[in-house]
Image (spheres, coloured by chain):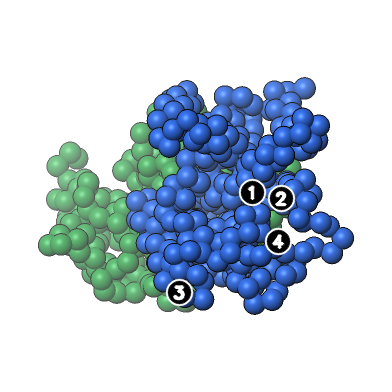
Chain colours: A blue, B green
Amino acid sequence: MPRARLALALTALVLVLLPVAANVASQPFWITVATRVVIYALAVAALDFIVGYGGMLSLGHAAFFAIGAYTVAFAAKNGLHAAGLNWLLAVVIAGLFAAGIGAVSVRTSGIFFIMITLAFAQMIYYLVNGIKPLGGDDGLPMTARDVLPGIDLANPTIFYFVALFFLAAFVLFSQRAIRARFGTVVRAAMQNERRVAALGFNVHRYRWAAFAISGAVTGLAGALFGDFQRIASPDSANWLQSGDLLVMLILGGAGTLLGPIFGAAAFLVLQTVLIGLTEHWMIVLGPILIFVVWAGKRGLAGLIAGDDV
Amino acid sequence: MSETMLGTHGLSKSFGALRVTDDVSLAVAENELHAIIGPNGAGKTTLLAQLFGEVSPDRGTIEFAGHDITRRPPYERARMGIARSFQITTLCADFTAEDNVALAVQAREPHGFAFWRPTRTDAALREPARELLGRVGLGARAALPSRVLSHGEHRQLEIAVALALEPRVLLLDEPLAGVGIEESRGLVQILQALKGTMTIVLVEHDVGAVEALADRVTVLDGGRAIATGTFAQIRSDAAVRRAYLGDAE
């Protein structure tokens, strides 16, 4: 079996067996960490959709994540507890915000793109901080998780698998989409925008659609996180969160299938282990990140799975 | 050669105090191969960029098949049937030669977003791409990333990409620049075969190639079109001799 396939199969196996192992070892905390990893991996995969394949370095994705979390928390506060509806709402609202922000920002590139996405995200950060019905500084707590008919989301193992399902579904979608006609144009425009326009493609339209999809899926990750933590917190909209998502992506490997998963896992597991020792845990992460970037452009995924993934 | 396929009227463009295009009026007939020559800095590439919409003129109009396209962006002009090649090769470096041509084949089809079927195995894109690569003599190099191809091969690939669009007008920006004698001969043969099948605007330094290929020639000097005619007419034009061909003959 080629190395890339093997890495993919092993990763899938670990993700599926992890909660079983946690239950056998009576370590429920592992499931909590694994769920965070999977939810963040979904957000990072959504970010990778535009960064790794589209060259759009967004420093504003925390905003979409927060919008997702606030959507479920606000819906719950107003008596809406159906997970299906609330998650769909989160996707739609985050997608609409992304469509609006994307319409402006995809017309720029490079440093300007970074700054515009950052500026929009900061606006949303101050908005959620300032709006009273959204809880201000304290955030918006939920009394219980949303409910899904026939599926007990209050059960940590089940919630984990629900999150894993969404991660797998999006990874499958994005891997198909980047190789299909849509993604071929987006990838080509990353290499040479002028050429792709000269062929007759409206590059802005393709980038805009990719950005909106990315924002919508990041919103879904945020909704899952809101339900998981049972709170929407204004910190989740902070630009440092956008930075964390990018660090996870670069660490794991942008433009790779497994990169978002490896990146989120390495980042969050390190954080969980080290933060008990020191709050300055990034002192350890920093050199690791530098080494991974120095060793190859494709992050942990490139080092572990080879260049094909 | 009758109807004007691509025309400009009083086209002018300045960069600061420099007039790079100065009241240029062109009329390129259908299926004509129209060459644009001139000394370095005469404004040839800027004129071509205006024809394609990458640079917008300060004054004047551009018409294509009877439509005013002066304000249309490049991607719309491409979809209307104008293709261009670039002087400095701008392909998608990580894509293979075949990927590059297949992308152009995709461009001429309707632009619905498709998210599921891989383009790599899409025969509707790949077969025309392979056929075109064969036509420009790159059949054996189809699977190589375009960044490893030689300069001359890039020029061939540029032409295959432009042809994949099945354009009505082909704008070629110095397709022979920096190419060796052998490769140059091959490229001239490819252009010879295309001549008469579509309207071609050829910006070129190689006067020998222009003589061999062009139906008519326009000479630019200091942004102005100082003469238009057959190569023989141009050669005997006093202003042209002074500006360009002159002293050496």
CA distance for labels 3 and 2: 29 Å
Total residue callouts? 4
The dot on residue A131 is 3
Among numbered discs 3 and 2, the one appearing first in the sequence = 3
Q: Nearer the viewer, mark 3 or mark 2?
A: 3
Among numbered discs 3 and 1, the one appearing first in the sequence = 1
In x, y percent, where is residue A39?
A: 64, 48
Among numbered discs 2 and 4, the one appearing first in the sequence = 4
Q: Are marks 2 and 1 on the same chain?
A: yes
Say whether residue B114 is visible: yes
Q: Which residue is mark 1?
A: A39
In x, y percent, where is residue B120?
A: 69, 42
Chain letter of the residue carrying label 2: A
Q: Are marks 3 and 4 on the same chain?
A: yes
The dot on residue A145 is 4
- Identify which residue is drawn at 39% across, 39% down: B176
Q: Are marks 3 and 1 in contact (CB under 8 Å)?
A: no
CA distance for labels 2 and 1: 6 Å
Asked which quadrant contains residue A269, the reply is top right
Q: Residues within 10 Å of mark 1 (few under 14, many from 20)?
A: many
Chain letter of the residue carrying label 1: A
- Identify which residue is drawn at 39% across, 53% down: A114
Residue B147 or residue A147, whichever sits in front? A147
In x, y percent, where is residue B55?
A: 33, 62
For the residue marked with disc 3, what is the amino acid? Ile
Which secondary structure, mark 3?
A: loop
Residue B39 or residue B208, whichever sits in front? B39
For the residue marked with disc 2, what is the amino acid? Ala
Q: Which residue is mark 2?
A: A163
Chain letter of the residue carrying label 3: A
Chain letter of the residue carrying label 4: A
Q: Are marks 2 and 4 in contact (CB under 8 Å)?
A: no
